[in-house]
Image (cartoon, coloured by chain):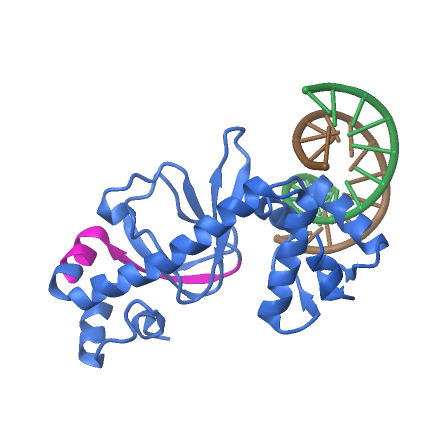
Chain colours: A blue, B brown, C green
DNA sequence: ACATTAAAGGATC
DNA sequence: GATCCTTTAATGT
C-alpha cells in the first residue's frame, strides 16, 4: 500500500535507493476517482506522476471543445513545464478510472533539480522524447484527412499491440477528440471503412484484415 | 469533406 | 430512471 512512485518513474528510477528514498519523502500521494480533475489551470503548480490508473490530458479549443492530447499511463508525469515559468492556461487532466497520483510541489522539485543535476539531465532527455510526440501529433492533425488519421492511428495501435486484433483504449467520443473530429464523423468513417472491408469492429474490439490496405491511405 | 443539429436506442451510473 | 454515449439522417459551411 505504501507503494513507491519514485521507483517506477523513468525520471527517478535510475537513482540509488537512498536517493530515491529522500525524493519519496517529498511526494504526496493522492487517490482520484473516475472523472475527477487532477490538473487544471486553476490548480497550483505541481509535478504529478501517475502511479496507477490512467489520466486523459486535454485542452479546450476556441469553441470550448475538448482536444484530447494524450493518455498518461503509470510512470508518466506532467507539470514540469510550469515549474520553469510556462503558464498553464489550457491544460486539463482527468482520471479515466480510479487513479493514484504522486505529487511534488514546485519548490521541492526545483530544489531537487539543483541538488541532483542527473535528474535535470534526465528530465531534458524525457522532454525531448515528449517533444517528438507532440510534433508528430501536431502534423498529424493539420495535414491529413480524417480517413488518413484514423488509418494511421489504427496502424500505430496495431503495431504497438503486436497484433491485428486489439481493443480501442478510448470511448468513441474520446477517439474522435484525439484525431481531431466529431463522434458523428468518426462513426461514419468507421462504418464506411468497415464496409470497405478494411477491418471488423465489435464495440471497441477491432480486427484488422490487412495492414497494407490501411497503409495505402 | 467535414461540421452541426436533432433524434432515437443503447450503455452506464 | 436520469445521464451520457453511439449511431443515423438531414442540412449547413
Query: Residue A67: where, in percent of width, then height?
Result: 53, 42
| Vertical order, A141 against C13 (above or below) | below
Q: Is residue A94 left or right of residue A116?
A: right
Quadrant occupied by the N terminus of chain A: bottom left
- List x then y, in percent, for residue A216: 71, 56
Residue at point 32%, 75% (across, down): A7
Residue drawn 64% across the image and 61% down it:
A155
Extreme residue toward the left, this view: A115
From the viewer's perspective, is A137 left or right of C10?
left
Which residue range is magenta in the image? A97-112
x and y percent of residue B8 in the render?
Answer: 85, 38
Query: In the rendered structure, does residue A103 fall within the stretch colored magenta?
Result: yes
Please tell me which residue lies in front, A138 or A84: A138
Say which residue appears at 36% left-offset and 39% top-offset: A41
How many marks can you see? 0
Point out residue A36 in the picture as x, y percentages from the top left corner. 47, 50
Q: Nearer the viewer, residue A136 or A178?
A: A136
Whether residue A165 is situated above or below residue A140 in the rendered picture: below
Residue A161 part of the magenta segment:
no
**A117 left or right of A198?**
left
Does residue A94 show up?
A: no
Regarding residue A62, the answer to whether it shows in the image is: yes
User: Is A187 on the left or on the right of A94, as rendered?
Assistant: right
The extreme bottom residue here reads A17
Name the one closer to the observer, A8 or A103.
Answer: A8
Q: Is residue A194 above or below residue A9?
A: above
Q: In the rendered image of this protein, does residue A67 appear above or below residue A50?
A: above
Q: What residue is shown at x 63% (from left), y 49% (from top)?
A: A149
Amino acid at each position: 500500500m505504501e507503494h513507491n512512485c519514485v521507483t517506477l518513474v523513468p525520471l527517478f528510477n535510475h537513482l540509488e535507493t537512498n536517493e530515491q528514498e529522500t525524493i519519496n519523502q517529498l511526494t504526496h500521494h493522492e487517490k482520484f476517482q473516475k472523472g475527477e480533475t487532477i490538473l487544471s489551470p486553476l490548480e497550483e503548480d505541481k509535478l504529478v506522476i501517475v502511479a496507477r490508473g490512467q489520466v486523459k490530458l486535454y485542452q479546450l479549443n476556441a469553441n470550448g471543445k475538448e482536444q484530447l492530447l494524450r493518455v498518461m499511463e503509470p510512470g508518466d508525469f506532467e507539470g514540469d513545464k510550469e515549474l520553469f515559468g510556462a503558464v498553464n492556461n489550457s491544460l486539463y487532466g482527468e482520471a479515466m478510472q480510479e487513479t493514484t497520483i504522486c505529487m511534488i510541489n514546485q519548490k521541492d522539485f526545483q530544489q531537487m533539480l539543483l541538488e541532483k543535476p542527473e535528474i535535470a539531465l534526465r528530465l531534458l532527455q524525457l522532454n525531448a522524447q515528449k517533444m517528438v510526440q507532440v510534433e508528430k501529433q501536431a502534423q498529424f492533425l493539420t495535414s491529413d484527412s480524417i480517413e488518413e488519421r484514423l488509418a494511421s492511428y489504427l496502424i500505430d495501435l496495431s503495431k504497438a499491440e503486436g497484433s491485428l486484433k486489439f481493443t480501442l483504449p478510448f470511448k468513441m467520443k474520446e477517439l474522435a477528440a484525439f484525431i481531431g473530429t466529431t463522434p458523428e464523423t468518426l462513426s461514419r468513417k468507421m462504418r464506411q471503412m468497415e464496409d470497405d472491408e478494411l477491418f471488423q469492429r465489435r464495440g471497441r474490439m477491432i480486427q484488422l484484415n490487412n495492414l497494407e490496405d490501411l497503409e495505402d491511405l
